[in-house]
Amino acid sequence: MLPNSLDLATLAAAYRAGLKPSALFAHLHAQAAADTHHAWISLLPEAELLARAHALDGQDPASLPLYGVPFAVKDNIDLAGLPTTAGCPGFAYAPQADAAVVARLIAAGAIPLGKTNLDQFATGLNGTRSPYGACRNAFQPDYISGGSSSGSAVAVAAGQVSFALGTDTAGSGRVPAAFNNLVGLKPSCGLLSSMGVVPACRSLDTVSIFALTAADAATLFGIARGFDETDAYSRPAEGHGRRFPAGQPFRFGVPRADQLAFFGDAHNAGLFAAAAARLQGLGGTPVELDFEPFLETARLLYGGPWVAERYHAIRDFIERQPESVFPVTRAITLSGAKPSAVDAFDAHYRLRALKRRCDAAWHEVDLILTPTAGYHPTIAAVESEPIRINTELGHYTNFMNLLDYAAVAVPAAFRPDDLPFGVTLFAPAHQDLPLLELAARWQADTGLPLGATGQPLPEQAFPAVAGADGMVQVAVCGAHLSGLPLNGQLTQRGGRLLRSVRSAPEYRFYALAGGPPQRPGMVRVAEGGARIEMEIWELPARHFGSFVAAIPAPLGIGKVKLEDGSQVCGFICESGGLAGAEDITGYGGWRAWLGRRP
């Protein structure tokens, strides 16, 4: 029996129960061939597709992590056996090999169904700029699908594939997710190889993932990512930093109320307020931010010289065959020939200044919540005013890759007109997995169905977060406590307070001679010790060395035993450095002693 949903957990259960990949793919090929949403540009021939599926029929479903999982590939990403058109028939070429990210997924057992429609040359956020037809929304066909990864999103929402690859330069992996009730992962730039991908803005592009669940997106991201030395923009994943498990509080930013834009929509402002309240319910504390630096950054993408990268990507082709390029796309792309080198440097200087201002938010919050798009226009509206509406669709998305952030678009609600409404969670680069973990909790809390099929979210375990988190926990007991003189040595290195604790009752506590600032010393003893008040902070491992190097003798970092029996890195003191020190053990902590001194 065919599964009622193609999410990874449901599909794996169906295979374990006896479903054969060949039976599933025969059904999916017929379904995709009959699609009326203009989601597909080309499908693998049925005989070839079924041959790939039959090759898995006799294998153990547990033998491959993506055993028999159907997926779609945006048609600016190479899939051997089908032409890559980038949404332009005159540009089409026959790739000899799969794109690097496609090859990784196929090696894991996934089977591609075909190539999906897109805004031509990935230039647009709406899905209408294609000679293969304007891609229609999976819920209401008169409305846009979002773009440029339009067909990829619709194919997933319609239940024709389990996941799809898109690309994201300005929001193309997030806006279609929001408009089709999907999870859209815009990974940190460079973590998924771009080899075999037709560039839009090569310095900003990333392959993106559309999935039915955040847990699925995390699994797929773990398989697809990896450093590619042949890709000049590839980079290894760094420690992902703090996570957002249940029970752990966090702070999230929201744009100042007067900086939220819904472009006349009557429903989305209230739905966004409800989304912020939902995030509070998951443990978050909202913090209003001045969003103007982010919005100014967004305006740089099309109002600055980065459009020259779009021209550079297809310069030879558009100069030879301008008539082959969609009119709106042609006008945008040819405008990229105008900026000068001086314009480019001016814009880069401005971007650096804006990034400094935007990054300051990470001293106040752990992530930021925004609408994914302010409103959801019809196809007719976009075709009548393509530039203005497309610009408005990028209001909350265009800045993301310029600032080098990670983002996840998640379903939030359904509007009174039955269209989906989505929001985006974003954080600094390399925070992809923590964001997905929070998105999984979010998605379970909403109770929304998956895609456009109406199936409920299944019980899914979030996959183990692979790799070290890149953070070090350190226990502080004196001048590094929050609000005290040396606390800035932690916060300036990206440190954050996790919790207040007490040591095991095995320490004597001293106020050391010297200063300012005055410093305490904890010395472990065999008897006569007491519990000492402490704080646990975490800071990025890359900054831990400089933190330790600044600690003067007789202090150092060692293992401190806590009241619950666990051990953590923390301040310790050499017993030989206690000359002239005052024994303040009886106070139980540094703050108590400071408060009782004459």
Image (cartoon, grey):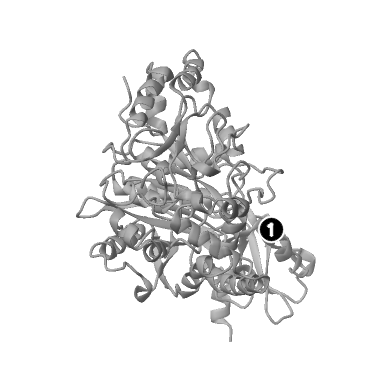
Residue at the far right in the pictured view: 576
| Percent position of residue 323, x then y | 50, 52
Task: Determine whether, in the image, residue 548 is placed left or right of residue 8.
Answer: right
Residue bearing the label numbered 1: 542
Asked which quadrant contains residue 337, the reply is bottom right
Q: Secondary structure at mark 1?
A: helix
In this view of the protein, can residue 377 be seen by the observer? yes
Examine the rendered structure and indicate whether residue 12 appears above or below residue 337: above
Which quadrant holds the C terminus? bottom right
Residue 92 as seen in the image, left or right of residue 138: right
Q: Residue at x 28, y 36 (%)?
A: 455
- Visible in this render: residue 534? no
Q: Position of residue 35 (x, y in %)?
A: 33, 34
Front residue of 376/571: it is 376
Residue 316 drawn at (x, y percent):
63, 52
Q: Is residue 131 above or below residue 268?
A: above
Q: Quadrant of the N terminus?
A: top left
Return the x and y of residue 105 as percentages of the image width and height: 55, 33
- Density class for disc 1 (Cα within 10 Å; few <14, some 14-19, many ≥20) is some
- Tell me what residue is drawn at x 57 percent, y 49 percent: 565
* Residue shown at the point (42%, 55%) measured from the top left: 125
| Position of residue 268 in the picture relative to residue 170 (left or right) | left
Taking the image as shown, residue 386 lies to the left or right of residue 270, namely right
In this rendering, is residue 459 above or below 483?
A: above
Looking at this view, name the residue that lies furthest to the bottom: 598
Q: Nearer the viewer, residue 169 or 304?
A: 304
Amino acid at the residue labelled 1 = Arg
Q: Quadrant of residue 11?
A: top left
- Viewer-nearest residue: 189 or 9: 189
